[in-house]
Amino acid sequence: MSKFLPLWPDQASTSAGQVDALYIYLLLVAGVMTALIFFAVTVLAIKYRRVPGREAQQIEGSTILEIGWSIIPFFVMLTFFIWGAVIYFKERTPPADSTEIYVVAKQWMWKFEHMEGQREINELHVRTGQNIKLIMTSQDVIHSFFVPAFRLKQDVLPGRYTTLWFKATVPGHYHLFCAQYCGTMHSGMGGDIVVMTPQDYAQWIAGGTSPPLQETGKQLFSTLGCATCHRFDVQGRGPDLTGVYNKPVLLEDGRTVIADENYVRESILNPTAKIVNGFKPVMPTFQGLVSEEQLNALVAYVKSLAQPPPGTAGLQNQPAISPAQTQKMQVQ
Amino acid sequence: MEHAVHNPALLHHFADAQQQKDAASLGMWLFLVTEIMFFGGMFCAYLVYRLAHFNAFAAGSQQLSIALGATNTAVLIISSVTVVLAVKAAEAGRRKVLVGYLVVTVLLGMTFLAVKGFEYREKFEKHHIPGPTFKFTNTFDDNGKQIPVNPKEAELFFSLYFAMTGMHALHMIIGCGLFSVLAVLAWKGHYSPGYFTPIENAGLYWHLVDIIWIYLFPLLYLISRHS
Amino acid sequence: MASRVIPANQAPKLNYLNNGHSLRSWLLTTDHKRIAILYLISVTTFFFFGGFFAMLIRLELLTPQGDLMQADTYNKVFTMHGMIMVFFFLIPVVPAVLGNFLVPLMIGAKDLAFPRINLLSWYLYIIGGILMTHVMLSGGVDTGWTFYSPFSTEYTNTKIVEAGLAVFIAGFSSIFTGLNFIVTIHRMRAPGLTWSRLPLFVWANYATSLIMVLGTPVIAITIVLVAVERLFHLGIFDPRLGGDPLLFQHLFWFYSHPAVYIMILPSMGVISELIGCFSRKRIFGYKFVALSSIAIAVLGFLVWAHHMFVAGISLYAAMIFSFLTFFIGVPSAVKVFNWTATLYKGSITYATPMLYAFGFIGLFTIGGLTGLFLATLGIDVHVHDTYFVVAHFHYVMVGGVLMGYLGGMHFWWPKISGRMYPEGWAKLSALLIFAGFNLTFFPQFILGYVGMPRRYWQYPPEFQVLNVLSTAGASVLAVGYLLPMIYFLWSLRYGPIAEANPWHAAGLEWKTTSPPPTFNFDETPVVTWEAYNYDEIPDKELEAPVAR
Amino acid sequence: MSDNAAHTSRSQGFYIAIGIGLLVGTATTVGAAFVNLGPFNPIIALLIATIKATLVVLFFMHVKGASEKLTGAVVVSGFFFLAILISLSLADYLTRSWR
C-alpha cells in the first residue's frame, strides 16, 4: 500500500482477496452503468438541444422498456446479493479448528487474552495460516473491531459476545481501528495487528508467563463456589457442565437452545433466564461480581470441559460444530 | 365570501363544508396513525424483551393488580360509550345531553387516572420504580410457586411498564383537557348538527387511547397468571 | 436578457408578498407561500450553521494529527453538523420550502388543508431549532447524529435530553407537514385534476409525506425512551438490565433509513419538473415515475437493518435485509432511466435549473450505485462506518437533495420572488458546486475503501493526501453555495421582473401571476389536460429568457 | 365522499350493547388468563384484545358503514407498517441463536 497516496488497502487475510474480487466486480458494473448514463445524458443533451424550427416529439413511454429496465438491473443486483451473502456467510462462520482469543473493548483500548495466557493491550500477535476466532465483548459502550487489511469488521457490544474470525496470510503490521463511534478518543482507539510467521509466533507465545486462560477459569470456578453445585462426580444442584458447550440444552419451558458462548455467559450473569430442564432456579446471579476478564476465563473453562478426555485425540475438534453446520460448510 | 355568511365555521380556502369536514376527518385519522406508530415502537420493544426475559416479565407482571387493571379497562370502555353517545347527541343537536356526556367522559377519564395514580403509589412503596432504589425480591405467584428472577430483568419489565402506562396516562390527561374545553364550548353552543367536527375528532382520539389500553392491559397485567 | 420593467403608471398587482408588510402579517400568516418563505429563511440559516461545522471538520482533517481543536470539540462539531443538516436542513428543505409553496399551487388549491397547522409546523421547527441552537452554544452534544445507546444513555455528559427534545419537536413539525400534504392532496385538488394528472413533484411530496407520517413517530418515541433512560433511569436499552442496545438501532433506523427518502424524494420530484420543462416534453413513463415514488416510500420501510450488518444482528436477518435492499434499487433506477429517456427527441435548453438536473442525475447515479455496494453484505462489512459510507450518503443527500433543491429554487424563483436571477452567475455557481462537490467527496470513496473510519479526529498519515483533496473541494463547494445566496438576494431588488410563466412551463403554478396572489388563483382552475402537456404550450423562442 | 352519514343509523341501544360486549370481552380475557392453556394463553389474550379493538374501530369510530374506503385504508396502513416494524425486528431476534 502506497504510503503517499494509498488507492488500495493491503491484502493480509484469506477474506481480503474474496472481498476485493467482489468489489472489483461491483466497480465494473457500477462503472459501466455510470458511464452509460453519463454518455446517454451528454449525447442526448447535445443532439436534441433546441434548434429553431424543431419541436420536441412527445413520447408517452414504453411498458416494455420499463419492465426491461426494472428486471434486468434487478437480476444484476441479485448477483451482488448472492455473492455478497456467500462471503458474509463465510466470514460469520468460524472454522471448527479456530484458535480462540478473547477481546475486551473499553473506552479507549483493546485488551486481548490468548488461550495460552498472554495478555496484550492495543496489540494483537497472530501467526499466518492459523484460523483465529475472536470472542469479543465491551465493558462500556459499543465499539467495532475493524482491520482494513483483513476486510473485516464486527461491532463489539456490552452485555454479550460477538465473534469474528480470520486467517492472516502475510506477515506485517496492520492497522486496527475502532469503527463504531465511542466517545472522546474514538480515533485513538486503534492498535496494531502483528502478523508473524509461525516460527516467530511460536517464539513470541512461549515468552509468556501467565497460566492458560482456562486454568484461570478453573481456579475461579472453585473460588467462586461454582463447583459446589456444578459437580463432575455426582449430580449436584446444578447441571454437570462436562461436554455442555455447543450442545443443545433442553430447557424447563420445553425450548432447546445451543449452549454457545453467549448462553454460558448469560447463565452466569442471568441464571434464571434459561433454566435447564430438571433443575431448580436456585443459582444466584454473578452480575457485578465478576469482571469481563474473569467472565471470559470462566467461559473458556466451561468450553474446555467440552473437549473429550485425552486419548480420543482424533476427535479433538469435532464437538465444536454441529453436524448441520458442517453440512452447510461443505455446501460452501 | 358569500358562503361564509351561511356557515361561520367554514374556512375560506375550502370549497364547501363537506370538503372541510372530509379534510378534518382524514387529518385526524392520519394523526391516529402517527399515534399507532408512536406506541408501536414501545410495543415492539415489549415483544422483543418479553421473548428474551419471559420469567422476569411474568414475575413483574404478577406484582400488578389485576383488579385495578380490569377496573380501569372497564372505566375506559364505559367512557368510550359515553363519547360515542356524545357524538350522537352533537349530531342530533341536543346540547345539554352532549355537555352531560362530555362531562361524564372527563370524570371517567379522571377516575382512570386516579386509579393509575393509586397503582403508581403502590409501586413506589414496593420500590418497583426503576432506578437506584429499585428492589425486587424473588417472589411467589398466586399458587405459591416460587419465581426467582434476576432483579435487573424485573427492572426492565417495570421500565417498560412505566414507559408504556406513563405515555398512555399522558394521552389520557391530554384527552381530559380536550374534552373539558369541548364541554365548555358545547355549553356555549359552538356546535350544531351541521358542525361538530371537533367533537367527532376528539372522540376518535379518545377511542384510540382506549384501544391502546385494551392491548396494554393483557400484555402487562396478565402474563402467566395460571400455575 | 431584456429586462421587463413594468411601466411606472401600472401599479403592481396585489400579491402574497405585498399583501401586508408588518412583522405580524408574516409571523401570524396562514398563507402557505408566506410560511414557505419563513421556512426558506430559517432553513437557509441552519444550512449555513451546518456548513460552518462542515468547514471546521474539513479544516481539522487537513492534517493527520488533531491540531485545530480538541477531540471532544471535534466530536461535538461533527455531531452538530449531522444533527443540524439532517433534522433542520435536509428533512424540511424541499417539502417545507418548495413543497409548501408549490403543492397548493400545483393542485389549484387556495391553501393547504390546515393553514394554521402549517404555521404551527413552522413554529415547532423554530422552537426545535432554537433549542438546538441553545444546545450548540452551550456545549453541544457528542454522540453523533445517531444517538447510539448506551453511549448516549450512560456515557456522555453532554446535553442529550435537550438535543433529543429539539429533534422530537422538529419531528412533530415534520409529521404535521406530512399530514397536511396528504390531506391537501387527497381533498383539495382542483376539479378535473385526477391522480393521473398530478405533477410528479406532487406525487413525490405525497410519497414523502407518507414516510413522515408513518416513520417520524417511531424516532420520536425512541428519543423519548433515551431521554427517560437518562432522566428517570428507565433502562429500556440498558444492557445491564438485559436491555438490548441493538433495539435502539432497530427503532432508530426504522425511521432514519426512510428519512433519507424523505430527503431525496421531493428532490426527485423537482428533477422531473425541470427535465420536463427544459426538454419541452412529457416525462417518459409518467406512471412509472409516479408509482416509483410510492414504491420507494413503502420499500424504504423494509430495509433499515442494512445499517446494522456488522452490529451483531443475526446472520439470517442480515441476509433478509440485504435482499430487500436491492428491491429499492429498482424504483430508483427506473427514475434515472426515465429522466434520461425523456431527453430523447426533446428540445433541450441549458438554463441553470437544467444544469442542476443534469448534475442531479450524475451525482445521484453515483450515490445510488455506491448504495448497492453497501447493500452487498460482503462489501458492507469492510466499508461500513468508513468514509465510503460518508461519501455515499453525501452523494445522495448533498449531491442529490441539494442539486434538486437549488435547481428548484432557480426554476421557481421567478414565481416565488417575481424576479429573475442572473443567469450567468447562476451557471457559474452550478458548475462550481458540481466540481467542488466531486472533488470533496470522490476521494472519500477511496479513503473509505483503504480503511479510514468515519468520525475520526486524527488519522494515520498515509490518508492525508486524499483528505487534503477533499478539503480543497469543500472550499470550492462553499463558494458555490455562497454565490446563489448573494445573487438571489441581489435579484430581489435588481433582478428583471419575471412574467407569470417565464419558462413557458406546464403546471398550474405558472397559470397565476408571479408572485401569486394570496389565495393563489383569482378563479379556481378546472383541469382538462394531462400533466406536462408541452405539445400544447408554445415555446416563444426569441422572447424566452431561457437561452442567452 | 361523505362519511358523516355513517353513524346516524346506529341507535343508543346499539352503542350500549357494543359497550357491554367489550366489558364481557374484558371479563373473558381476565378469566382466560387464569386457565392454563399453555402457549395459547398469550394468543387468546391478544385475540380477544384484537376483537375488542376491532369493535371499537368499526362501530365507535364508525369505520364500518363509512361510504369512503380511504379511512379504512388509512387504519389498515397504520397497522401494516407497525406489523413491518415488529415482524422484521423479530426476524433478527428470533434467528440470532440459529447456529
Image (cartoon, grey):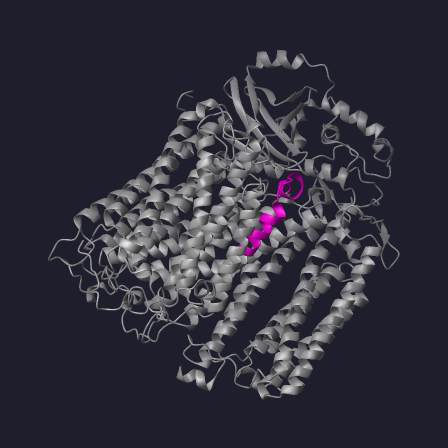
Side of A28 relative to A166 (left or right): left
Q: Which residues are magenta?
A: C150-170
Q: Which x, y percent locates residue C101?
A: 38, 62
Which residue is depicted at the point 27% across and 51% down? C354
Q: Which x, y percent locates residue A72?
A: 34, 49
The answer to whether residue D35 is visible is no
Side of D22 relative to A180 (left or right): right
Which residue is depicted at the point 25% across and 63% down? C501
Q: Give C493 or A11, whichever is nearer the viewer.
A: C493
Side of B29 relative to A70 (left or right): right
Task: Name above or below for residue C285 compared with residue C528.
Answer: above
Side of A29 relative to B51 (left or right): left
On whether residue C155 falls in the magenta region, the answer is: yes
Task: Pick out the residue farthest to the front.
Answer: C9
Q: Give A309 or B58, whichever is nearer the viewer.
A: B58
Which residue is depicted at the point 50% across and 32% down? C453
Mainly helix, strand or loop, the magenta region?
A: helix
Q: Which x, y percent locates residue C227?
A: 65, 50
Q: Which x, y percent locates residue C202?
A: 37, 63
